[in-house]
Amino acid sequence: MSKEHPTKAVRVAIQRPLYKLLDYACDVDIQPKPGCRVKVSLGNSVITGIIVETDVESEFATLKPIIELIDESPVIDEKLMGLLHWSSSYYFHPLGEVLFHALPVDLRKGKSVPKVEIWNATSAGLELPKDELKRAPKQQAMLDYVIQKDGADANNLKQLLGDNWRNTSRELIKKELIAIEEIDPQKLTAPATHVFSVNPPHQLTEEQQQCLTDIDAHFNEPKLRPILLHGITGSGKTEVYLSVIAPILKAKKQVLVLIPEIGLTPQLLSRFRQYFPDSNIDCLHSGLADGERTRVWLGAKTGSIDIVIGTRSAVFTPLLNPGMILIDEEHDASFKQQEGFLYQGRDMAIKRAHDLGIPILLGSATPSLESLYNVEKERYHYLRLNNRPGASNPPDIALQDIRTLPLDAGISSLMMTDIRQHLDNNNQVMLFLNRRGFAPVLMCQDCGWHAVCSHCDMGMTYHASMGKVICHHCGYEERVKSTCPDCNSTKLTTQGQGTERIEEVLNTHFPETPVIRIDRDSTSRKGSLEEKLELVNSGEPVILIGTQMLTKGHDFPKLTLVGILDVDQALFSMDYRAHERLAQQVLQVAGRAGRGAAKGKVILQTSQPQHPMLLSLLSQGYANTAQQILNERKLWNYPPLGCQALVRVNALDLQLAHNFISTLGADLAAINSEKVMLLGPMPSPLARRAKRYRFQLLISAEKRGDLHGFLHSVLSIISKIRKTGGVRWVIDVDPVDFL
Ligand SMILES: Nc1ncnc2c1ncn2[C@@H]1O[C@H](COP(=O)(O)OP(=O)(O)OP(=O)(O)O)[C@@H](O)[C@H]1O
Ligand SMILES: [Zn+2]
């Protein structure tokens, strides 16, 4: 194509770590829109791209043509496109990768947007005499429903009949009473009939009611500000959320609920479904099959799903009629994405709500310092719930000095006695240890050998149930042999304990009581977490052992004793966020105790009973402790006061990685900006991971604008340094992981 024949040009983003967009020619009879996907050629391959700009004046005289326009209408709408542009520039991440991240996997691969299937009654179905299906009540219910709704989609039917609804559908199709019609989602109009009802399980307490009134008032202010609901554990925040959401749903708007952990979805989903029996509620998280994710994505986009409950990346769910965003456990670290596109889901949600002009509510018993600081700066409204409903009271936390106590697998003898007592009273017990596996050290008693990851130079964790040592940094694993690989001695032993070992010891101490371990290993099989939670929810006396997966959100009314086994390491961490995280973790896990009628008890084992942070947390509570930590941060200008970005560089070859970051460091030092401070380059604390040598450079500034201005220089300098031998680099804006 030459310049004499001006074809239309479009600008396309592709899923590559590329900071520029590519121009393609486009036939005049194609009507491309930003947000539509296309097939384009790149080198010798055909790849999927997303149109970012149309009617482009390209600087190139000849352009390759678009091979195919996949979507007639955008898969990313204008508002979402705006948010993704913004996040690409805020996080200095290539736009193509950001855009693709926002799509379900099937659509990233270029599959077409599935047709929406609508179940309709056939004329035979419409004319069927009333009691004809009385022996198949599910079929009757489904037929009645599609007739009443004049067509229903998969989301409606799943909601009506539960997970096995397709079996019912198959039967009715076989009988030719129902037929499926496929409709192009772009031609779908908003859901026709809208039934709405609420079924609140409790009457709100006075305090909850007051909170609700305040929230409603703030939602109606002309200038919306995010609301932080700081309610102690078990104060019934979920109950308040549900009442806040009701009028939004009633107004036929959609609600996006973000939660930190897949493990919380079953409990939350059932509470939401019970409260809103006629609304369509679904989940989006990484545990879903690709097809399911696309279905929910499409349901939200076409407006057939009213509430989407999802983890971090659900923040990008398209919504036809967005009404409100809710972030539960807003303090949780898992809202920050740690791989690929490094974004903070909570911040993204706040930005999204702002762009859409819709209210956003953040809730936590232990708010993040970021949010508390935003309250201090009056950027957020602040509401509190200080009491648990009914007779339930927050448990007291007792420090237990373990320096002189006999320990079995790290559990003190006194703790064992308490466990016995609570079980004898027909209650449940939970032990918290944030380390999975059997033991963090596997060693030889004769020669001192211990298992080290050959890819990371870090110790490997012994997993007895699998007979393996596994590196928790890179996932590398090895089978454990019966003899020492260095000296052939058979005297292999372990040191320290993880959840597996605790499970084993408790099984011997309490053979008559079910011991339920909940961690990443024990819940990796689909459905296994649900099974375990069901056993706990039965109310039988059980002992739960869990990692941080268990700490948040769960509501087990029969749980009366919580034991916190090992916090000492975190007390002396180099990471300036360690104390904040520990305070949150301790209070969250403690908050699982005594949520029912019986008073709860929490025992925190430590060899540091005089540690000021622990003492402050116990005597003054979270808000005061958080304020103290915030004041310390102010002294040093650490976030959330100042702001930071971390440049990470790694390579298989130590020298190459070192050369690269040294060049970058020298060039940046030469800029000599007084507004930013550089720390490094230096080796990362985890200096080698998955065979790659790692370095980092920390950039701090008092003002966001200065940091971002400087990062533009970083980007331009870094792109010019010659990358040899597969050196990789990444910019992490607002980092939380300094390993
Ligand atoms: N008004 C009420 N009357 C009676 N019971 C209530 C009321 N509100 C909440 N509850 C009950 O109190 C328990 C705790 O409520 P909920 O799980 O909502 O607390 P939460 O604030 O979300 O706690 P956490 O921060 O620990 O997750 C639940 O069992 C809930 O059913
Ligand atoms: Zn490793």
Image (cartoon, rainbow, N blue to C red):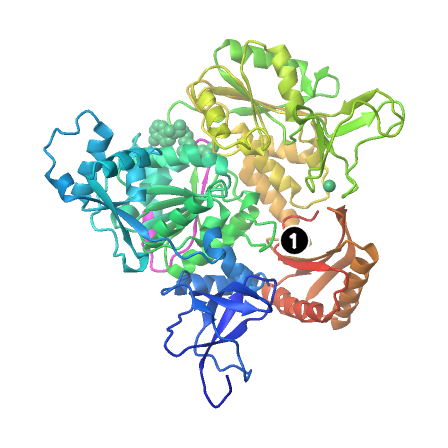
Q: Quadrant of residue 42?
A: bottom right
Q: Is residue 306 above or below residue 717?
A: above
Q: Is residue 222 magenta?
A: yes
Residue 724 pos. (x, y %): 77, 64
Instruction: Report the amino acid beneath label 1.
Output: Tyr
Mark 1 neighbour class, 10 Å CA radius: few under 14, some 14 to 19, many 20 or more: some
Tell me the residue at 19%/44% (across/down). Answer: 149
Ligand 1 placement by image quarter: top left
* Residue reaching furthest to the bottom: 4
Tell me the residue at 71%/21% (across/down). Answer: 402
- Side of 110 relative to 171 (left or right): right
Tell me the residue at 69%/38% (across/down). Answer: 472
Residue 443 in view (yes/no): yes
Residue 221 pos. (x, y %): 33, 56
Label 1 residue near ligand 1, CB within 8 Å: no
Q: Is residue 431 magenta?
A: no
- Which is nearer the eye, 85 or 5? 5
Tell me the residue at 73%/37% (across/down). Answer: 572
Label 1: which residue? 638
Task: Look at the image and give the residue range highlighted in magenta.
Answer: 216-235
Q: Is residue 401 above or below residue 157?
A: above
- Which is nearer the eye, 478 or 380? 478
